Image (cartoon, grey):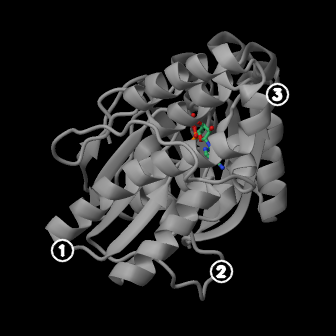
Amino acid sequence: MVTILGIESSCDDTSAAVIRDGVILSNVISSQAVHERYGGVVPELASRAHQQNIIPVVHDALKQAGIRKEEISAVAFTRGPGLLGSLLVGTSFAKGFSSALNIPMIEVNHLQAHVLAHFIKEDEDDTDQPGFPFLCLLVSGGNSQIILVKSHHEMEIIGQTIDDAAGEAFDKCAKVMGLGYPGGPVVDRLAKEGNPGRFTFSKPHIAGYDYSFSGLKTSFLYFLRDELKSDPDFIGKNKEDLCASLQKTIIDILMDKLYRAAKDLKIKEVAVAGGVSANSGLRNAFEAYSNRYGWKIHIPKFAYTTDNAAMVAISGYYRYLDGQFCGKDVAPYARVSI
Ligand code: KG4
């Protein structure tokens, strides 16, 4: 029996989870409300909040899992990418925990963890997992990538954004409309009431499977600036249609490249991961492509879309089986590829 404690602290969510033989036993997430008034994550405040949260969160995760700490085989933690001060809290905690219990430490790449979230079993009979190779669209506040997943440990980025991420496009355009931060979920909610064909915004023309979202952001901004000149209440009157049209444009951009990659590589198993995978329009688009092109799709549970330690624990589990441990001298890294 292999029992992994996972720790996630890369940005503004402190999370701990327990996974036993691939099956989830607990996943506790403490989000930090302190950033809301600043319109974005403040790194120094994030690391201080992690320090306050980490021990209670681990305590709750063990309690909910119904296990004693002595039953843990190894502690897996997010080494990067992320905010250095935030990562340092999780990494330091993992070092202390592994020393106190004399158990191994396992470093986890945050981006790989998002992909591997698809392997978390809800119970022992859960067999709904992707088969290799598959494509994973990883879309979050910091990333928009198409990843060719060859095994639990081998992943290759075949396309990625050359500027803003999809989540940033949602958040920045939402900010222009005065919808608060993070705006992605608000756009999603308002889009349900709007007409996605009402407005059109520019789409990028770049080669290969790469993405670009900065042009869309500018086109959205200039469009609103012009409309507001003749009608100062243009946003208020058209919020739903603006959100629906913006969301449709972002989804069209994402799905177009993903479709091309799947077609060229002749892969029919396709997954989505990261914060933006919570978007209902994107989920519907996956269903539609599945029906139209015979894709076998994998859409994560909502709890595994944003940052969480369950995905870190499952990544740690596969590394444990492969004997991939790290030394106590390990340091977090802010930037690293998948
Ligand atoms: O993976 P994630 O939690 O962490 C970061 O990379 O920061 O992703 C957060 C991003 C934010 O940009 C947020 O606006 C976006 O995911 N997001 C959404 C939705 N839920 C979260 N975007 C669109 N629709 C949603 N329902």
Q: Which residue is mark 1?
A: 266
Q: Is residue 196 left or right of residue 79?
A: right
Q: Nearer the viewer, residue 293 or 274?
A: 293
Where residue 264 appears, x then y in whole percent? Answer: 15, 66
- State ligand 1's quadrant: top right
Viewer can see residue 72: no
Residue plotted at (57% across, 46% down): 245
Q: Amino acid at mark 2?
A: Asp
Q: Which residue is mark 3?
A: 33
Q: Nearer the viewer, residue 193 or 29?
A: 193
Question: Which element carries disc 2, helix, strand or loop?
Answer: loop
**65 lies above or below 78:** below
Q: Which residue is mark 2?
A: 123
Q: Amino acid at mark 1?
A: Lys
Q: Residues within 10 Å of mark 2 (few under 14, many from 20)?
A: few
Question: Which element carries disc 3, helix, strand or loop?
Answer: helix
The nearer-to-camera label among 1 and 3 is 1
**334 lies above or below 244:** above
- Pick whichever of labels 2 and 3 is earlier in the sequence: 3
Q: Residues within 10 Å of mark 3 (few under 14, many from 20)?
A: few
Please report contact status of discs 2 and 3: CB closer than 8 Å, yes or no.
Answer: no
